[in-house]
Image (cartoon, rainbow, N blue to C red):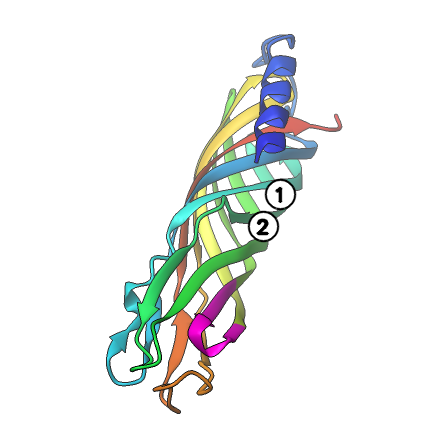
Amino acid sequence: MKQIYLAIVAILAAVATLTPAQAQVENPWRGFYAGLNGGYAWNSANGRFDTITDLSGLNLNGGIVGGQIGYNWQTYQFLFGIEADASTHAGDDDTIVIDPGTMGAASLTADMKVLTSVRARLGWAINNWLLYATVGWGYGEFKFKEDAPQLGFSEKIRIDDNGIVFGGGVEWMLSYGVSVRAEYLRYDLSAGSNISTSVINGDSNSHIGFDNVDVARAALNIKLSN
C-alpha cells in the first residue's frame, strides 16, 4: 500500500508542472492513457453453515485500489473508447465465527481478490469535461478461508464469476493530458460453492456465495499519446 501512495504523490507532483488544458485543442481526449483508481465496493454474501449460522452476515464491502489503461477515439464532441481495468481490496476482509459443536469454534473469513473488466465507453466532450456511459465484460474472484484450529483443519475456497459490467461517470481534464474522474460501475456477478463437510456440523447444505458488486471510485489518468 505504501508504494501505491508514493506513486500517487509522484504523479500529482508531475501534474503540477503541466500547462493548463486549452479548450481550442482539437480532439484533446484522443489517444492512449493509463492511470490509477481508488474507491469503495459494495457486495453481499449469502449461504448457510449447517442449519444455524446465516453467512449473509459476512461483510464483503471495503476500499479498493487498482489501475486502468485505455484508448479514446474523438471526433468533435463525440468520443468512443476501450478501457481495461483491475482492482483489489485494500487490505479489507471480514470474519464470522461458526460453531462446530463441542470441539471448539471455527471461523470463515472472506476477501475480494480481484475485480477486472474490459469495457467500451461512449462519451460527449464539452470543453474540458467528458460525460460518458460504459458497458462491457467483467470478472470477479472472492476467497473464503475456513479455519477450525482445534481440529487442525484449514481450507481455502475460491469463487469466481464473469458477466456484464455497466455504469457511467464524469471526467475533467485539469491540464492537457491529465484528467481526473468519478464513476460508478455495476458488476452483474453471482457465484457460490459448497463448504467442506470436514468441519464438525458441516453438512451437504453448507454453502457460501457472493452477489452483484457495486463500485464507486475516483481515478487519475495520464495521456500517453497525442
Which numbered marker is on residue 120? 2
Q: Is 6 inside the magenta-drawn segment? A: no
* Foreground residue among 36 and 123: 36
Give the amino acid type for the residue marked by disc 1 in the picture: Gly
Q: Find the magenta span and give its range.
A: 142-155
Q: Residue at x 52, y 20 (%)?
A: 128
Q: Dots 1 and 2: beta carbons under 8 Å?
A: yes
Q: Residue at x 55, y 45 (%)?
A: 121
Q: Residue flagged by tag 2: what amino acid is it? A: Ala
Name the spot of residue 191 as percent of width and height, x first: 46, 73
x, y percentage for residue 5? 57, 28
- The 10 Å Cα crowd at callout 1, few under 14, some 14 to 19, many 20 or more, is many
Does 69 sit above or below residue 154?
above
The answer to whether residue 68 is left or right of residue 146 is right
Residue 20 picture quarter: top right
Quarter holding the C terminus is top right
Q: Is residue 124 above or below residue 196?
A: above
Tell me if mark 2 has few (under 14), some (14-19) or many (20+) residues whose alpha carbon lies within 10 angstroms of its own.
some
Question: In the rendering, which numbered label is found on residue 153?
Answer: none
Tag 2 secondary structure: strand
Is 156 on the left-hand or right-hand side of 209?
right
Helix, strand or loop: magenta stretch:
strand
Residue located beneath label 1 in the image = 81
Is residue 30 depicted above or below 20 in this figure?
A: below
Q: Position of residue 57 (x, y in %)?
A: 28, 64
Disc 1 is placed on an element classified as strand
